[in-house]
Image (cartoon, rainbow, N blue to C red):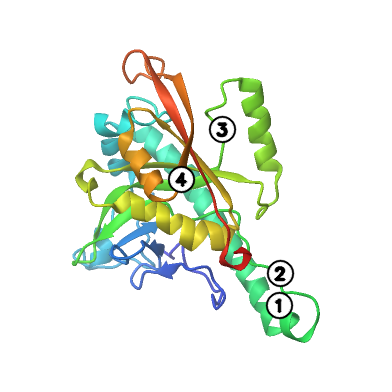
Amino acid sequence: MASPFVSSTTRTFSPPLHYDEETNEPYLPLAPPFGPRIRLTPPRLYDPRPTPDSDPDAPHNKIEDDVAALVKHHNLAEIYMFLTGPPRPYTEEYAKEWLKKRKTESQALIDEMDRETSSYKGLVEAGTSVETDTPTPRLVLSGCPVRVIRERLDDGTDVFLGDCFLARSHFPEIADLKERERRTEENYTYEKGDPRIVYSFGMFLSPSAHGRGIMSATVQTLIEQWAVPVMAARQFEVAAMSHNVGSQKVFLKNGFALVNELEDAVDLEKLGKGEGKAGLKLYRREVRSPEEK
């Protein structure tokens, strides 16, 4: 079976993705000292091997998809008590459906990257920015195709550590539903690269990986290595439940500032995650690219 990640595009002007030598799976290594051992990859719903291998002990034949890992982690109280989205109980069927959607999104972004880098390469080789007064259009992509945090082991296998994704904000902190819908719709009308777009993060990390600074490095990597230089992202905001101290520390370490606190904003009982309500804390960060400083 051909690898879903194989591409004929020459990535001379590619964003900073790497490609696994055995599986050809794209990945983004975390900022030092974690990368390349710890990396971000696309979600997996099947083995990303380029071809079947008769040796069952080959490292890339040991790669599993993410269904079991998602079910395991989303049913841990240490994780679901800090998330507002996933259902409880989190089932295998839901995991497979979720992975199908995320895989489709990831592949669409990889395809976009191939198209855009090919066009960009042609413009540069034609001397557009050197021999004429017309500047070469900036390479800008609409999203990031990698999101799952994994740790590569010495035997070639890897361990699922968590998930961290970047998307346009849906402004969960806005209590008025009509205003929230209006702001969300407006946020999605902007063309990619528009500095008015507000981006947000969603994330969780395996309890086994807590206390190592991995999520802080993940957010740093996504902002500095991808969102700002590749997506031209400038505005970020995140909402964390008041009792989610870990996530708040992650964003404070990454230059976010607390801008608002909302009491009783999340109905825990309605979400099946306890009794009463929880507050929300809103953090925000604005950045400039090196060229704008």
Task: Return the x and y of residue 50 as percentages of the image width and height.
Answer: 39, 67
Mark 4 Cα within 10 Å, few/some/many (few <14, many 20+)? some
Mark 1 Cα within 10 Å, few/some/many (few <14, many 20+)? some
Q: Is residue 180 left or right of residue 281?
A: right
The residue wearing badge 4 is 256
What kind of element bears circle 2?
Answer: loop
What kind of element bears circle 1?
Answer: helix
- Labelled disc at residue 171: 3
Answer yes or no: is residue 257 visible: yes
Q: Nearer the viewer, residue 42 or 205?
A: 205
- Labelled disc at residue 137: 2
Q: Disc 4 or 2, which lies upstream in sequence?
A: 2
What residue type is disc 3 on?
Phe
- Looking at the rendered image, the quarter that the N terminus falls into is bottom left
- Labelled disc at residue 214: none
What kind of element bears circle 4?
Answer: loop
Tell me whether circle 4 and circle 2 mark residues in contact (CB < 8 Å).
no
What residue type is disc 1 on?
Leu
- Mark 4 → mark 2, Cα distance in angstroms: 30 Å
What kind of element bears circle 3?
Answer: loop
Q: Quadrant of residue 60?
A: bottom left
Q: Disc 3 or 1, which lies upstream in sequence?
A: 1
- Mark 3 → mark 1, Cα distance in angstroms: 38 Å
Q: Quadrant of residue 109?
A: bottom right
Q: Is residue 249 left or right of residue 140?
A: left
Mark 3 or 1: in front is 3
Q: Disc 3 or 2, which lies upstream in sequence?
A: 2
* Relative height, residue 97 to residue 151 (above, below): above
The residue wearing badge 1 is 123
Mark 4 or 1: in front is 4
